[in-house]
Amino acid sequence: MLESKIIKLTVRDVRFPTSLEQHGSDAMHTDPDYSVAYVVLETDSDAALKGYGLTFTVGRGTEIVVCAVKALSTLVVGKTLKEIVSDFRGFYRLLSSDGQMRWVGPEKGVIQLATAAILNAVWDLWARVEGKPLWKLLVDMDPAKLISCIDFRYITDALTEQEALDILVKAKKGQKSREEQMLKEGYPAYTTSCAWLGYTDQQLTQLCSEALAQGWTKFKVKVGADLQDDIRRCSLIRKLIGPNNTLMIDANQRWDVNEAITWVTKLAEFHPLWIEEPTCPDDVLGHASISKALAPLGIGVATGEQCHNRVMFKQFLQAAALQFVQIDSCRVGSVNENLAIILMAAKFNVPVCPHAGGVGLCELVQHLILFDYISVSASLNNRMCEYVDHLHEHFKSPTVIRNAAYIPPKDPGYSCEMLEESVQKHHYPEGEVWRAVEQQGKP
């Protein structure tokens, strides 16, 4: 099956009108429509083998990612899966370093989102061929083989290939018991579904109460638009969840550096574990200043969902600019680049707490965090994975949460495959759902 040749790539713009009910709303993204550029790789296999991939967006602009995927497709179609995975590092560089297209990156922005969508589909295809969920493919992979999938260019001053290999080899001890633990108990999660910025107090109260009844103990609140409103909402939620449950706050890049320090200091009475994305996601030194200022208050800084690539994560780690690494399954160059980031975080001893939510992000990132615990960090200290309870019903292998924990997926692949009916209904702009929204006159 590794000899299967990729003979066709299709990509579709799939959007969900989540803005109508303020799902996903925050201080910077007030009306998000959760969306994906959805990629399908077809092969010449007799079994009609396909690989599915996606990259997440929030509405307008998805069409630009679709165009970028089409531009990169010529580098994929015609290759066998064996050609790709036998030199995955080389294939990653082929996509990210094309002599002309890299000019509109390189390794950042729309072109990187498109690269992730394609590579996510390739990893899905590989896991399906091996008959394993992606996390299991990674866990079972020989460390040297796994290292060969990573492009270490630009990061060897922070992590060498040998150091990465040593981390993987060292983590072999106890790996089997950790895998059994995950299969039995799942990976700890926190919820963001209760406190979107556009929700009313009544919604906050109802959703937090329901989540507590379901066993949730870790909650994230969107902040950053209005200080007095943040104080009121954080007070409400802290009273609802009690003093012993965990609270995090997320500003989604709203503030300048000094403003962030002042604002979060005034929210310190609610004892948040972290402030997420307090300022521009590219400002490494700004995050370092915020981290230093908030450390005496016991508040860490979390960021990463909009970090372009492994090089930015390298700088954040080198500058002690974050205390929680938030990888994203679509923002950087797919699994290949996330492996590099996970291994760098392990070297710097900074916990990985992935960004998820959106549409499909929970399905994808669960594989990466399972790999991190079983094969790299071997620790659950200060570690948790975000969960948002939206749109899972559109996936063939939806995320399973039990006792506020991600239960490891068992189906082969990367959990990217969407239900074709959902794709057709939400295809933008001609899908049935969007025709109805247009007729009703979306505000």
Image (cartoon, rainbow, N blue to C red):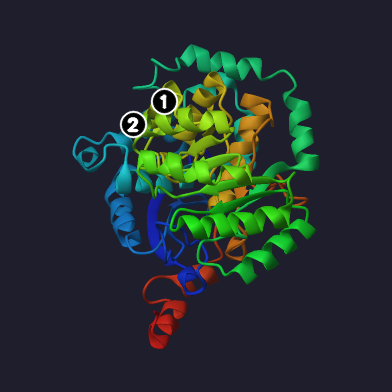
Residue 435 lies, in percent from the top left, at 41, 82
Q: Is residue 369 left or right of 125 when viewed as pictured?
A: right
Question: Image quadrant of residue 183?
Answer: top right
Secondary element at tag 2:
helix
Question: Is the residue 8 above or below the residue 109 in the image?
Answer: below
Label 1 or label 2, whichever comes before in sequence order: 2
The three-letter amino acid code for the residue at tag 2 is Arg
Secondary element at tag 1:
helix
Q: Which mark is residue 17?
A: none
The three-letter amino acid code for the residue at tag 1 is Lys
Q: Residue at x 76, y 27 (%)?
A: 176
Residue 106 lies, in percent from the top left, at 27, 37
Q: Which mark is residue 93?
A: 2
The residue indicated by pointer 1 is 314
Question: Image quadrant of residue 107?
Answer: top left
Is residue 25 in view from this perspective?
Answer: yes
Q: Nearer the viewer, residue 332 or 261?
A: 261
Residue 202 lies, in percent from the top left, at 64, 71
Is residue 359 in view from this perspective?
Answer: no
